[in-house]
């Protein structure tokens, strides 16, 4: 934490700028400098820039990112996104607070070392529950493992700065390739450490092999994932690889050159083993052949357009992107097609916006193209705020060039010369990659003036979000870029007529732009040949929750929900039964198992009470309570409402209060009717997408799972999930091992070796630890 | 010009006009709370929603620009339901009283906080005018009223109620001993006359207010002197001397009310003649009802059967009854209140305004928990309750300053209250947690800001920007917890006089009021 110093603020102003539109980046810069926003710093910004104090204040208090009290040295963000929620993220959050003895409205431990907060969604849904400490992400964190996680983090802190071993010889032509996924999920599961281990082995052994960083491989459930292309061209995938496995895997495929090297290697190897033996963990990685049925099922059903060359493309390798068809579409669009012809192609492809509502992309483009204005803007909406969705993050991390190419083509079609990519701050890797990609494109004539030697000009800049779901709404997003308080406004006028700074603005989602190069390159027909009558092409989904194989998937429209769950997702994990699939996040709804055969397209999902949304797909099984799910989403939207409209601001709060009552058994008989009445009023009166869709999770669960609501009215939670309605008991199967008593975080179980244990229900916080740790399965919940 | 249809009326409007403006200029009413002409539409309250053909949801008319061929419906069941819900949701997050508990507790609904403010400011003439708006016999009542107002005074739960009755007597006695006692302004004669039978508190009160409405009043009583029950032997004369009654009634009758003493119904005057000669007759006969049965006046359990809202005697067209004789509580202040209410009803009847008036909406804060009460007390005078027989100007003013000002500064011009009345809104339709508590006031300056009453429309934020006010109010936070506040935890104490007036004027509710008018 840095002490307030006006010179630091002035330096921030120097770096960022002092115009009114710089309000948000200025605040971000100041917070980065001090670790929080000191009041004096905000005051100084108001004095030294064109930003009014009231505007700065209304912005600073709007976004989650900003804090006004000093934070601890390290920030622990516990993800409570949908997938993490259903896997106990909230319990993990509470466990961290208990661990650091943080109570009441405090969020930082007494020693000012750790600040613990909830994160709306870290976008690592397949790792649920996920936790981010500093820039390290941990997956599958449980209440029992937080001690180890903290220890590991502190260990890394000590290691930091020692530098990674580099193993690229360069002069000798490589004899094969090692592909390692460096998407956020892979990194969170240790692919960074794995990479370091691989590089160390290469350095030690002088194996001539190219190590290639590829983007997200999609099979997030198997990360870290290592693909070996041996000198003969044969491909082998290793899944769940641990750093200590690197040696044996590499040595299996590649031979170190010369006997001396080999000898030194084995010596050092032995030494290492001796030093690290105590820490050695059992190896549980195995090679997987591309033809193995589970890999085939996961991959074969998919059709890759937005995620084309998944797992083989280096995210920032411009040459490789070019050699695999990249920028062909741009060449075509610049040299062969007129703006109208580009729009015609997009029209014929049948592409609809992938941000949620499914508005025809070509109509939007046409509206901007036909708006008369000297200045037009193009914006990419990368504010993927839905908990349970991480497609856009993966696309930005793995295929930044594709997005840029799509935007340049769109800019030519509509006549825009300046554009912005608005990326949420929770995605640092995406911001880094896209920033880098823009620089590379500019240096290579794909951006800037005279693109590909033509008179086409496009300048792209990145705007970092600051933690507000509502900024995914287009009018709010534009206000955020303009440096205003991002409360959505009434449409019309639509951004296509009056957008950024009042100028015509094209705003599309990341995935939408990602389809454009493929459509132009392969032809509109190829795209429209895929999918259903109304919904063409493919859709990228983030598949997570209670499935065996979660990940980033791209499927042709029209595939059924059941196919996705069973064939791609490998069915429900651990023998439970499919209950519902939540599609579309907080704006969507739950498709019950009974409707799992409906095709996935805009119309069918809408009819079923869900929406395509941005593509979060969280699979729920019988242990998930639907009232709890509805409450979870409403809690989210309620907190994210900008607060402008009465119905959204107060109405959603009243709905949430009813759901909260239900979940603790204090519901009233008229509550279900009141819920519905409010839900319809909110849908019918809100001016933006957030409000209009906020009641969807409640409406759809109430429609398909009314019996569960009624059970809650009687004080029963059928899924035994709602903590206010359940009790844990220990049966006669108890072997008296005392593990539960040792692990109980609140001392609700007295330690009685070799006797049957009992739970003090007054002390019990229903965290479920005892049930999880009991070796005799003697703990039951009712 | 743009052509559009609103409620089947075809209009032409300039481009850029909003639907709300277009409708209003065509005389079509659309209710609105957070819209003020000349300000950017806040599109916040959602009371002005209308239906536009081809649009799936309802749209706020204040922010919607007219477009060619647009077809708008401004009133339907669906729209009324949504508007009512918008108002009721706002009320569910509204914390405060429209009128103070004492005013509601007073059977005559006297504006007690206003009287106290005037006494505190030494304005006794103003105080008596406030009192006589609702109570024509304050010197009398100031001595014998059981003071239900003090029982519900919020301060009663802490260190004793404000001595309301004593202060009322103080103001009334000052008026009685004055050479120029208070005279109400009476309306010009409307050419109607009313006979009132019984010159007790109810009859006197009815006569007083009917006279103010321009009606000729004749007051009949079988006793030689007016006063009815006030002259009863049950009243302790050391408490209420006859001289006070005489003086107070004298002033009342001097407004031009004819009193006929020793006049008994059926002997000195005929009932039939009365109903024929007068436009209306009011029975305010107290406990003496039995003999009325012979004129086919419905009597049950020794009470005249009359409608308690319209004071009209059952089965009669122009016969009214008020006070104890219709079963009202045998309480002087109740009788006075009945007389006043009956006068209003009779006046409505005589002027042909026979419709049922809307009951003004009253938001109730209810009982405060000890912590809240403590917080509210912190901002008031620490003086203790007074109960002496005599008191001087300064003691009276000090006592009046003990008032917690529970009433709302905008009770007579609050947009939310007017709409809640119009839509018959129910306070507890959606009750739940409050985003701000009543008494969360920041009033160090000329403006008093009560966050509990803020509807978060931001008109004051706009006003601040217009006036270049630093630091003006700004939006803070988002969602349910969003509020209007001065940045960095500041207060509005630096607001200039003129800006303060503008804030108070632009705020649609009682969230912003001028502190010195409170």
Image: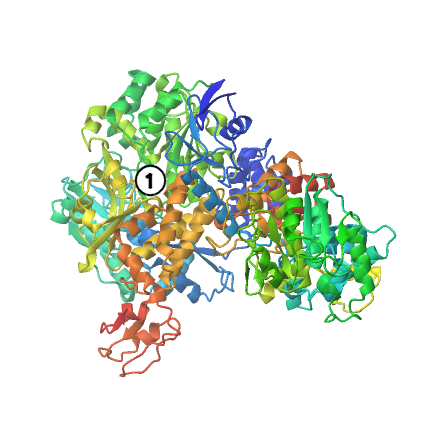
Say which of A200 and B247 sits in front: B247
Q: Is residue A51 above or below residue B258?
A: above
Which picture quadrant has residue B386? bottom right
Furthest residue in direction front, as rendered: B267
Could you tell me if residue B33 is visible in this image? yes
Horizontal placement of A81 versus B309: left or right? left
Which residue is at 26% across, 57% downward?
A707
Label 1, on which residue? A392
Which picture quadrant has residue A588? top left
Secondary structure of residue under mark 1: helix
Q: Is residue B134 above or below residue A368?
A: below
Q: Position of residue A407 (x, y in %)?
A: 36, 28
Say which of B328 and B73 sits in front: B328
Say which of B260 and A272 sits in front: B260
Say which of B318 and B453 sits in front: B318
Horizontal placement of A523 versus A90: left or right? left
Horizontal placement of A181 versus B412: left or right? left
Q: Position of residue B326 (x, y in %)?
A: 59, 59
Q: Position of residue A311 (x, y in %)?
A: 24, 41
Q: Position of residue A71 (x, y in %)?
A: 51, 55
Could you tell me if residue A5 is visible in this image? no
């Amino acid at each position: 934490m840095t002490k307030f110093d006006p010179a630091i603020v002035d330096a921030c102003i120097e770096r960022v700028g002092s115009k009114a539109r710089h309000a948000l980046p200025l605040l971000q810069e100041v917070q980065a400098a001090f670790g929080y926003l000191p009041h004096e710093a905000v005051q100084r910004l108001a004095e030294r820039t064109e930003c009014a104090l009231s505007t700065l204040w209304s912005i600073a208090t709007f976004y989650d990112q900003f804090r006004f009290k000093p934070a601890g040295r390290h920030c622990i963000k516990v993800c409570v996104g949908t997938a993490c929620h259903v896997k106990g993220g909230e319990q993990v959050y509470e466990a961290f607070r208990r661990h650091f003895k943080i109570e009441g409205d405090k969020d930082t431990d007494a020693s000012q070392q750790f600040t613990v907060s909830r994160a709306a969604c870290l976008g690592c849904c397949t790792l649920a529950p996920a936790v981010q400490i500093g820039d390290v992400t941990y997956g599958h964190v449980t209440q029992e493992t937080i001690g180890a996680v903290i220890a590991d983090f502190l260990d890394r802190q000590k290691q930091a700065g020692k530098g990674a071993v580099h193993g690229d010889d360069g002069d000798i032509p490589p004899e094969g390739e090692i592909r390692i996924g460096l998407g956020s999920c892979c990194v969170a599961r240790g692919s960074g450490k794995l990479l370091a281990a691989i590089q160390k082995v290469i350095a030690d052994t002088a194996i001539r092999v190219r190590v290639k960083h590829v983007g997200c491989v999609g099979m997030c459930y198997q990360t870290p994932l290592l693909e070996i292309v041996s000198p003969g061209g044969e491909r082998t995938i290793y899944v769940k690889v641990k750093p200590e496995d690197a040696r044996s895997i590499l040595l299996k495929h590649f031979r170190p050159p010369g006997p001396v090297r080999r000898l030194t290697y084995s010596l050092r190897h032995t030494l290492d083993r001796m030093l690290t033996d105590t820490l050695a963990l059992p190896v549980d990685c195995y090679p997987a052949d591309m033809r193995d049925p589970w890999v085939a099922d996961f991959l074969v059903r998919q059709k890759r357009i937005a995620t084309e060359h998944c797992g083989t493309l280096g995210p920032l390798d411009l040459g490789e992107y070019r050699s695999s068809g990249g920028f062909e579409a741009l060449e075509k669009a610049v040299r062969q097609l007129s703006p109208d012809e580009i729009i015609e192609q997009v029209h014929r492809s049948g592409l609809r916006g992938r941000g949620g509502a499914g508005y025809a992309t070509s109509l939007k483009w046409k509206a901007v193209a036909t708006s008369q204005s000297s200045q037009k803007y193009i914006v990419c909406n990368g504010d993927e705020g839905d908990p349970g969705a991480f497609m856009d993050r993966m696309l930005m991390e793995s295929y930044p060039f594709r997005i840029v190419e799509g935007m340049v083509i769109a800019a030519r079609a509509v006549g825009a010369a300046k554009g912005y990519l608005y990326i949420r701050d929770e995605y640092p890797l995406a911001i880094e990659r896209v920033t880098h990609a823009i620089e590379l494109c500019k240096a290579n004539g794909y951006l800037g003036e005279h693109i590909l030697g033509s008179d086409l000009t496009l300048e792209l800049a990145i705007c970092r979000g600051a933690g507000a779901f509502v900024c995914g709404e287009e009018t709010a997003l534009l206000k955020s870029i303009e440096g205003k308080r991002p409360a959505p406004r009434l449409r019309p006028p639509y951004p296509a007529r009056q957008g950024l700074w009042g100028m015509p603005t094209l705003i599309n989602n990341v995935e939408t732009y990602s389809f454009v190069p493929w459509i132009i390159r392969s032809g509109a027909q190829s795209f429209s040949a895929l999918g259903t009558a109304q919904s063409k092409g493919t859709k990228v989904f983030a598949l997570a929750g209670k499935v065996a194989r979660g990940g980033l998937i791209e499927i042709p429209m029209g595939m059924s929900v059941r196919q996705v769950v069973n064939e791609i997702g490998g069915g429900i994990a651990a023998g439970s039964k499919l209950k519902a699939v939540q599609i579309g996040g907080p704006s969507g709804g739950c498709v019950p198992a009974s409707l799992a055969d409906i095709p996935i397209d805009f119309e069918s999902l809408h009819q079923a009470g869900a929406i395509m949304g941005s593509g979060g797909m969280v699979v729920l099984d019988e242990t998930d309570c639907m009232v709890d799910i509805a409450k979870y989403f409403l809690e989210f939207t309620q907190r994210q409402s900008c607060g402008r409209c009465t119905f959204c601001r107060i109405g959603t709060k009243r709905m949430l209060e009813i759901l909260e009552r239900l979940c603790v058994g204090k519901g009233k008989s008229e509550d279900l009717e009141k819920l519905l009445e409010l839900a319809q009023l909110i849908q019918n009166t809100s001016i933006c997408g957030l409000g209009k869709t906020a009641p969807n999770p409640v409406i759809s669960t109430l429609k398909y799972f009314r019996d569960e609501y009624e059970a809650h009215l009687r004080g029963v939670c059928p899924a035994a999930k709602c903590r206010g309605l359940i009790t844990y008991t220990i049966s006669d199967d108890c072997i008296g091992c005392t593990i539960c008593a040792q692990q109980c975080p609140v001392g609700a179980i007295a330690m009685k070796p070799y006797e049957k244990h009992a739970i003090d229900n007054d002390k019990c916080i229903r965290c479920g630890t005892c049930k999880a740790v009991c070796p005799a399965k003697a703990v039951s919940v009712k | 010009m743009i052509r559009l249809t609103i409620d089947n009326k075809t209009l032409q409007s300039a481009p850029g006009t909003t639907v709300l403006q277009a409708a209003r200029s065509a005389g079509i009413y659309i209710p609105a709370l957070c819209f003020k002409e000349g300000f950017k539409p806040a599109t916040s309250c959602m009371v002005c929603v209308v239906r536009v053909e081809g649009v799936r949801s309802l749209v706020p008319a204040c922010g919607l620009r007219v477009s060619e061929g647009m077809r708008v419906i401004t009133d339907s069941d669906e729209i009324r339901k949504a508007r009512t819900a918008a108002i009721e949701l706002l009320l569910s997050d509204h914390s405060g009283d429209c009128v103070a508990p004492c005013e509601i507790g007073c059977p005559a609904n006297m504006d007690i906080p206003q009287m106290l403010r005037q006494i505190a400011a030494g304005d006794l003439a103003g105080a008596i005018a406030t009192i006589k708006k609702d109570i024509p016999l304050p010197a009398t009542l100031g001595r014998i009223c059981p003071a239900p107002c003090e029982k519900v005074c919020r301060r009663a739960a802490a260190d004793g109620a404000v001595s309301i009755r004593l202060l009322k007597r103080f103001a009334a006695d000052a008026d009685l001993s004055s050479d120029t006692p208070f005279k109400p302004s009476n309306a010009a004669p409307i050419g109607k006359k009313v006979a009132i039978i019984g010159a007790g508190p109810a009859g006197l009160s009815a006569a007083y207010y009917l006279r103010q409405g321009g009606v000729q009043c004749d007051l009949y009583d079988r006793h030689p002197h007016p006063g009815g029950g006030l002259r009863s032997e049950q009243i302790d004369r050391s408490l209420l001397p006859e001289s006070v009654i005489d003086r107070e009634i004298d002033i009342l009758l001097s407004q031009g009310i004819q009193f006929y003493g020793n006049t008994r119904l059926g002997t000195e005057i005929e009932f039939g003649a009365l109903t024929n000669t007068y436009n209306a007759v009011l029975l305010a006969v107290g406990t003496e009802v039995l003999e009325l049965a012979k004129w086919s006046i419905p009597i049950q359990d020794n009470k005249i059967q009359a409608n308690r809202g319209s004071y009209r005697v059952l089965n009669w067209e122009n016969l009214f009854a008020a006070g104890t004789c219709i079963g009202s509580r045998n309480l002087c202040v109740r009788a006075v209140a009945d007389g006043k209410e009956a006068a209003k009803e009779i006046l409505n009847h005589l002027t042909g305004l026979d419709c049922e008036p809307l009951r003004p909406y009253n938001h109730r804060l209810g009982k405060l928990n000890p912590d809240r009460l403590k917080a509210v007390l912190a901002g008031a005078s620490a003086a203790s309750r007074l109960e002496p027989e005599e008191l001087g100007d300064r003691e009276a003013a000090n006592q009046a300053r003990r008032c917690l000002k529970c009433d709302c500064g905008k009770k007579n011009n609050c947009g939310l209250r007017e709409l809640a009345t119009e839509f018959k809104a129910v306070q507890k339709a959606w009750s739940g947690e409050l985003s701000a508590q009543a008494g969360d006031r920041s009033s160090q300056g000329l403006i008093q800001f009560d966050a509990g009453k803020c509807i978060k429309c931001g008109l004051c934020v706009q006003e601040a920007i217009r006036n270049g006010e630093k630091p003006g109010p700004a939006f803070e936070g988002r969602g349910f917890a969003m509020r209007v506040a001065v940045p960095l935890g500041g207060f509005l104490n630096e607001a200039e006089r003129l800006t303060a007036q503008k804030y108070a004027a632009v705020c649609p509710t009682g969230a912003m009021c001028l502190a010195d008018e409170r």
